[in-house]
Amino acid sequence: MKARRRSRLSEAIAAGVLPLLAVVGLWGCGYRFAASGVALPETAKTIYVQRFGNSTRFTGINDIFMRYVKDEIENHHRLLLVDDPAQADLTLSGKVARFYTVPVAFNSVLEPTEYEQVIGIDARLTDNRTRKVLWSGYNVNDANGYASVPQAIVPTSPQFLAGNLRASDVAQMPDIQVAGYAQSLAQSQMLAGTAQRLYEAMSDGF
């Protein structure tokens, strides 16, 4: 059965439930500018990532996100990660403030066929020598959708192609397995995208 889209997503955007940045993450064309690092002090060489807090009901999402943040920092080769705050020039701290999933498409009997995951991060970067907050960001966010039934999977989409399954594999999987795989893939991509946004924001000062 052909999925029938509802207007809840549009209503949520209009009501401010999904911030503009999340919409960009949802419908963006994929272009990203590399972080220049111009806002980081020239003398700063090391960074300590303090364990993020978690204001959501999803246990452990803060620790999972932190791994993506650390990977993103290492990928840029600008700052060296250290495990001891006393040895760090900078400290990145924050929390996962929002993390939720909403249905965005339904079939003819109003069963959800597609969902949207949304995450929002509050963070700040502190100079350990001067104790000055160099940057703070509220609701650094991203969003990613996923299908919960095989019929809603688009095998030619960049998201699907980034995974390790073929369309023929998905066709043989039960709905619950499809949903689990698609959700895990979407979450991984969303967390990686949010970590990239966070690094770009703190290193460029916006």
Image: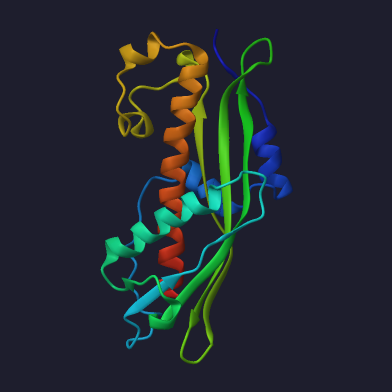
Total number of numbered discs in the rendering: 0
Q: In this view of the protein, which residue sits in the foreground, 48 or 4?
A: 48
Name the spot of residue 190 as percent of width and height, x first: 46, 45
Residue 206 in view here: no
Residue that extends furthest to the left in the rendered view of this protein: 77
| Rendered-image quadrant of the N terminus | top right
Where is residue 106? Give x, y as percent.
62, 19
As drawn, 95 above or below 106? below
Q: How does the figure colour the protein chain or chains? A: rainbow
**Residue 102 picture quarter:** top right
- Residue at x 69% of width, y 33% of height: 8
Please tell me which residue is depicted at 42% across the width and 12% down the height of the picture.
Answer: 173
Can I make out residue 124 in this image?
Answer: yes
Report whether 58 appears left or right of 148: right
Q: Report the side of 181 relative to 79 (left or right).
A: right
The image quarter in which residue 185 lies:
top left
Q: Position of residue 90 (x, y in %)?
A: 43, 79
**Is 43 located above or below residue 124 in the figure?**
below
x then y, percent, for residue 123:
55, 67
Q: Decide: is 154 above or below 174.
A: below
Q: Residue at x 64, y 36 (%)?
A: 9
Direction right: furthest residue: 15
Q: Is residue 153 above or below residue 18?
A: above
Q: Nearer the viewer, residue 91 or 10?
A: 91
